[in-house]
Amino acid sequence: MARIDLGAIVDVVMPNAAPESFPLIGLAAAWLYGLAHHGHAAAHCIEGCLTVHHALVEYGIASRVEAVAVKVERAWGEKGPEDFWGLEPRYNVDGTFNGHTVLVVPPAGRFIDPTIQQFPDVPGSARAAFPLISPLPGGDGLGDAPFSVYRNAPDHYLTYLALPESHRQAWHSAKIEAMTDDFRAAGADLAANVFAAMQQEPLREKTAASPYPGAASVALWLGGCRVCR
């Protein structure tokens, strides 16, 4: 997996993000940067989704974790896999999760895939190392039909398929539930660190103009009159 450039998060990605995606991309990218910085691979989809979920709680933004099916195809050249990954999400006997999760964020009209980099068919480029944030295809959810997201990083398609209701919460387990306080604390810490970045130029004015009242009000409280200029 290619490493995320921390400077690129603040200097390039967040300033160019659409208002609805700001600060979503900052949270997801900062979490993934921390994961890679400590030498871990990207195969931590539940951990990433839950940490960003609790960080969004700090901003007053609702979200939910859902198991999904996904496949990766290159836009050119060799044909990609025929089958989706994660159609039957379940836990293995060793406690690992055999499936994939994303974070659905209805107020933003977006979903976040913090760990799409874990799949071998995703190009190993710096651009492809960033988490995916894409519009929701079906109102406040993932819809009922497969849908593809094109990424020029370099060219490849990610095709997602919402699972039946009975499968979407298959990521729950007694171990995950026991770690709720840990995820909540990690989310609060992530939110605080990203807020600190959001108080710096060139992000300060964009933070104050956030379409999410909770994020804007906390930004004003942290930054005082500076963010009003």
Image (cartoon, rainbow, N blue to C red):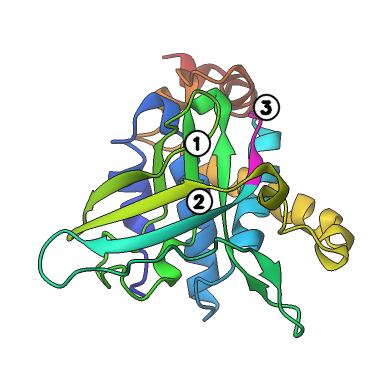
In the image shown, does 70 or 64 lie closer to the viewer? 70
Corner quadrant of residue 216 = top right
Kindly identify the residue that appears in the image at 60 percent across and 58 percent down: 48
Type of amino acid at the residue the image marks with label 2: Ala
Q: Position of residue 187 (x, y in %)?
A: 69, 50
**Location of the C terminus (image quadrant):** top left
Would you place residue 161 above or below residue 106 in this image? below
Residue 54 position, x and y percent, is: 70, 44
Q: Viewer-nearest of labels 2 and 1? A: 1
Q: Pick the quarter of the image with the N terminus.
A: bottom left
Q: How far separated are the C-alphas under marks 2 and 1?
A: 25 Å
| Residue sitting at x 71%, y 56% | 186
| Magenta stretch, residue numbers | 60-65
Residue mark closest to the camera, 3 vs 1:
1
Eyeballing the image, is 36 above or below 72?
below
The answer to whether residue 5 is visible is no
Q: Position of residue 55 (x, y in %)?
A: 65, 43
Mark 3 = which residue?
60
Residues at marks 3 and 2, CA–CA distance in whole angstroms: 16 Å
Hey, what amino acid is under mark 1? Asp
Q: Would you place residue 67 above or below residue 99 in this image?
A: above
